[in-house]
Amino acid sequence: MAVRLLLVVAVVLAGCTGTSIPSAEPAAEEPVVTATVAPITDLVRQVLGDRGELHGLVPDGVDSHTYEPRPSDAQMLGQADLFVANGLFLEEPTLRLAEANLPAGSATVTLADETISRDEWAFDFSFPAEQGVPNPHLWLDVRHAMAYVELIRDGLAEVDPAGGDVYIDNASRYLSQLEQLDAAIGQAIDTIPGENRKLVTYHDSWPYFGRRYDIAVVAAVQPSDFAEPSAREVRTIIDQVRDEQVPAVFGSEVFPTEVVRVIAEEAGATYVEELSDDELPGAPGDPEHSYVGMMVANVRTMVTNLGGDPAALDAVTPS
Ligand SMILES: [Zn+2]
C-alpha cells in the first residue's frame, strides 16, 4: 500500500502545482516480496530482477511439507508488500501466519490454486484422494511454472505499478527460457526407451511432470503421513519394481532414507541417490542454483539412469 499512497500523493502534488513530476524525485518505493519454497522464490527473483527486496522463508534442504514457520518469518511477512506461496495445502501454517502478519494493503498470490482447476488435481500414492489433499508439486511441469511466472508478474505489477514494464520485460525474457527448457525436457524424455519410461521415487513429486512429459509414475515410496513406509509397503514396491522391470529408483534430497537403496537392491534396479523438488543445486549465486538448474539436473539424472540421452538439455543454460 505504501507504494500506492506515494503515487497518489505525487499525482495530487503534480495536480496542485500544474507541473509534471520532476524526474529528480526519488523513485517510488520498491516492493518487499516474501516467498515460500526455494524454486518459487527463484521464479520471483527472475521476474523481480534487481528491483525491490526478496525473502525466501523455507530454508534450502528443509522439508516444505511439514515446515513450521519461525518467529523471524512472522517479521518478514510483516514487511511484505507481496506474499507468494504455492498453495494447494503445501504451506498451511505459513499461510495462517501470513494472514495474521501481512500489512494492510499487501497482496497474496497462491500460485497452484490459480493455475489449475479442481478436476486437474492429482491424487496418488502419498496424496490419496480420501484425504482430500492433492499433490501440490505443480512446478515440476515447466508449463505450470510458466503460469506461475505470469501470476508473479501480475502480482508484482499490482503492488508496484511503477515497475510494471520492468516485470513485463523480465518475465517475457524468462518465459522464453522456460519454453526452451520445456521443449528440451520433452526431447530428452523422448529418448528413454518406451519400456523404461517409468518413475519410482521416494518423494511423490512427479505426477504433473509425468503427465506433461509422458513418463509413468509407477510408485512413490513415502507414505501420506511422511513417516517411513511399513515393511509390507516396502515389499509391495519391491515386487512392483521387479515385475515392471523398472531400471532405476530415485531417492529425494530432502528425505534421506535407506529404504530406497533396499528396494533397488532387492528388486535388481539401480539406486539413484536423489531427485529434487525443493532444493536448488549448487550454492547461492551459482547459475545452477535456480529453478532451471534444478530441472536440468533432475532430468539429466532421470534420463541417464533410464537409458536415454540427455543431450537436448545441453542447449539450456541456467542464468
Ligand atoms: Zn515435495
Image: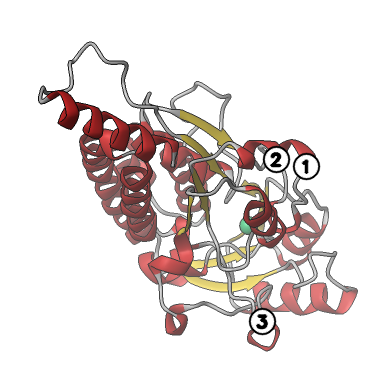
Q: Would residue 315 be found to the left or right of residue 156 on screen?
A: left
Please, what secondary structure does the residue beneath circle 2 have? helix
The amino acid at mark 1 is Arg
Residue tagged by mark 1? 70
- For mark 1, give the secondary structure: loop
Q: Nearer the viewer, mark 3 or mark 2?
A: 2
Helix, strand or loop at disc 3? loop
Looking at the image, is mark 3 or mark 2 earlier in the sequence? 2
Q: Is residue 210 above or below residue 120?
A: above
Please name the amino acid that badge 2 sits on. Answer: Asp
Task: Please tell me the numbered disc located at residue 8.
Answer: none
- Label 2 packing within 10 angstroms: few (<14), some (14-19), many (20+): many
Query: Upstream in the sequence, badge 1 or badge 3?
Result: 1
Q: Which residue is mark 2?
A: 73
Work out which residue is located at the far top of the displayed protein and give it: 24
Q: CA distance from mark 2 to mark 1?
A: 5 Å
Image height check: is 173 above or below 147?
A: above
| Residue occupying the point 47% across, 68% down | 113
Tell me where residue 117 sits by quadrant: bottom left
Report the disc number at residue 128. Answer: 3
The image shows residue 129 at horizontal and vertical percentages of: 63, 86
Mark 1 in CB contact with mark 3 (< 8 angstroms): no
Residue at mark 2: C-beta within 8 A of ligand 1: no
